[in-house]
Amino acid sequence: MIYKFLNKSHSRSVRLLIDHLSGTKSAPYCQQIIRTMSSTSLDALPKVDIDPSGVFKYILVKVYDKEKDNVEPSITIVRGYKRCNYHSDIFDEVQDKLHPLDCEPLGGGRISHEPDNKKIHIYGYSQGYGKADHEIAAKLIKDTYPDYAISVSDEGY
């Protein structure tokens, strides 16, 4: 049965689609669809997920999809939440949400998000993961918040 190629990360709608296709197409064709859908999973992943306001820790994370044709697709994402006391708490949460994708912490820092003033300031470092490349974080955040003034500093903790 085609389900041997699925795992818990595939949604119910994907399973229904595969059920439908497996009745009309060959199993190899269905496997190709699954591979195509999983390769686009990185594209569907939000590049930035930060709290809507306040000062909080953030991390840069490189997310890897499964290797295909000797290529391991990856993207870099920004995650930052007030609810997390440590950068490692953010990373643990990201890993749990993105399983079975592989995640690598690239560093961390802090974000000051002022939505009323449309300002985001990125600064500081993570004691556990080291300093993130704030310029990369700023570019990703600017793409998500194009109307905001984004500033970066290497100072502060």
Image: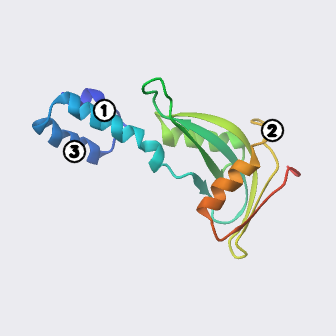
Mark 3 Cα within 10 Å, few/some/many (few <14, many 20+)? Answer: few
Mark 1 — residue? 6
Q: Earlier in the sequence, mark 1 or mark 2?
A: 1
Of residues 62 and 129, the one nearer the viewer is 62
Task: Nearest to the eye among marks 1 and 2: give it.
Answer: 1
**Residue 82 seen:** no
- Residue that appears at 68% across and 71% down: 115
Quick one: label 1 or label 3, which is nearer the N terminus?
Answer: 1
Query: Which residue lies under the disc numbered 2?
Result: 127
As displayed, is residue 43 above or below residue 114? above
Label 2 SS: loop
Residue behind mark 3: 17
In front: label 2 or label 3 = 3
In the rendering, at what x and y percent does residue 109 appear?
76, 48
Task: Tell me which label, 2 or 3, sits earlier in the chain.
Answer: 3
Along the horizontal axis of the image, is 48 left or right of 3? right
Q: Position of residue 153 (x, y in %)?
A: 84, 54
Query: Looking at the picture, which amino acid does disc 2 mark?
Result: Gln
Question: Residue 27 at what x, y percent from top left?
Answer: 19, 29
> As shown in the figure, which amino acid type bears the numbered disc 1?
Leu
Residue found 48% across the figure and 36% down from its top: 99
Q: CA distance from mark 2 to mark 3?
A: 46 Å
Give the CA separation, mark 1 to mark 2: 38 Å
Give the answer, above or below, for where 104 lies relative to 137: above
Res. 95 in view: yes
